[in-house]
Image (tube, helix red, strand yellow):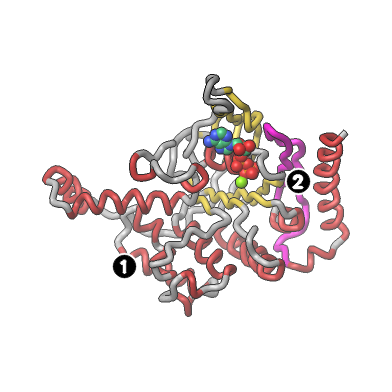
Amino acid sequence: MRFPGFFGGVTRRKSAGDWSEISSLNYGHKSSLCTRGVPWVGAVCFARKQRRRPAVSVGIQGSTLEVKGVGKSYEVVRDSKVPPVLTEVLQPVDVLARPGELVSIVGPSGCGKSTLFSIVAGLEAPSVGTIEIDGADVTGTTGHVGYMLQKDMLLPWRSILDNVILGLEVRGVARADALAAARPLLKEYGLGDYEAARPAQLSGGMRQRAALLRTLLFNRPIMLLDEPFGALDAQTRLQMQIWLLEVQATFMKSIVFVTHDIDEAVLLSDRIYVMWGRPGSVVQEIEIDLPKPRGVEVTTTPAFAEYKEQVRSILMRKKEEVSL
Ligand SMILES: Nc1ncnc2c1ncn2[C@@H]1O[C@H](COP(=O)(O)OP(=O)(O)O)[C@@H](O)[C@H]1O
Ligand SMILES: [Mg+2]
């Protein structure tokens, strides 16, 4: 795992989580060192303060993400008396997201979707293959993507505003600049009246919106969303999907979206990668050629139903093959 010491005690799934969250903890750790008056650390901190702080912008548009032949094996301990066994959890997969595209990965639990995200985010190294962004090899390096999990990962003691600017704080952006960037976004996307509220005071949908805005403000060209609406009720979920389509039409990030929900994948995606198996692999790639901008009305069209059926039948066929 890439995060030593301070993160040593957390589980893999947590540590592979929201990148801005992880960075913020790391940053907090460094800050606390500064206040202890350790001379050389103090000097480093002083030098840092002298450096020009990065400006805030929220407008970085999407990049081309290419996952090329990425596979992963882990050393798994099955029995303490025998050496660990190298176990493949992800067969080599190719995934492409062009600037402004939203591509979905649909597949059952355990087929390696989150593992793939950890590799794309640079939190884990692949066993084979490379991650390229705009043609540059970024395999194993962090900081290129915004990463959001199903669990909102908002810090309960911070206000919504302070949660949303977390990623910017991590990057050393001045608080006033971070607030100036965050406030219009909160207002525009329906959270303007909840700036001072704590996460517990918000509905599930609102918390997910705040988490998504935080990922957006982190302002990376690529966003990885791992089942972000998985815990929401059907009605809220649909509202959030439409909301995400609006956000995406404005910011034109490149988004990779993991979901179990076939309707959600068809509504949101330019392309769907259907994954299956243990070790998982991409068994089908489907271009979703539905008109844009998309709204809820598209869900009642015959074309929408056909795409849904196409994905469903692939997954059903795979399930039957296993049970034969
Ligand atoms: N650190 C690890 N060591 C060994 N096996 C792991 C590790 N992380 C994940 N796995 C295994 O990899 C497989 C894929 O996990 P995951 O990527 O979380 O799947 P998904 O997100 O599709 O549900 C699972 O069988 C899981 O148990
Ligand atoms: Mg997962």
Q: Compared with residue 193, is residue 171 higher up or lower down, i.e. above or below?
A: above
Whether the residue carrying mark 2 lies under 8 Å from ligand 1 is answered with no
Give the residue pinned by disc 2. Answer: 287
Place of residue 269 in the rendered image (x, y in percent of width and height, measured from the top left) = 70, 52
Which numbered tag is attached to residue 176? 1
What is the x, y in percent for residue 13?
52, 45
Q: Nearer the viewer, residue 45 or 234?
A: 234
Q: Percent x, y for residue 256?
A: 61, 48
In what quadrant of the picture does the C terminus appear?
top right
Q: Report the amino acid beneath label 1.
A: Ala
Relative height, residue 214 to residue 259 (above, below): below
**Residue 286 lies in the magenta stretch:** yes
Q: Is residue 274 magenta?
A: yes
Q: Is residue 134 visible?
A: no
- First of labels 1, 2 by sequence position: 1
Q: Is residue 133 above or below residue 308?
A: above
Q: Horizontal placement of 48 versus 271: left or right?
A: left
Q: Secondary structure at mark 2?
A: strand
- What range is drawn magenta here? 270-295
Return the residue nearer the eye: 94 or 40.
Answer: 40
Position of 197 compared to 270: left or right?
left
- Please report the residue visible at 62 percent of the width from the left and 54 percent of the height from the top: 227
Q: Secondary structure at mark 1?
A: helix
* Figure quadrant, ligand 1: top right
For image coordinates 55% across by 59% down, the residue present is: 251
Q: Residue furthest top?
A: 82
* Distance CA(mark 1)–CA(mark 2): 43 Å
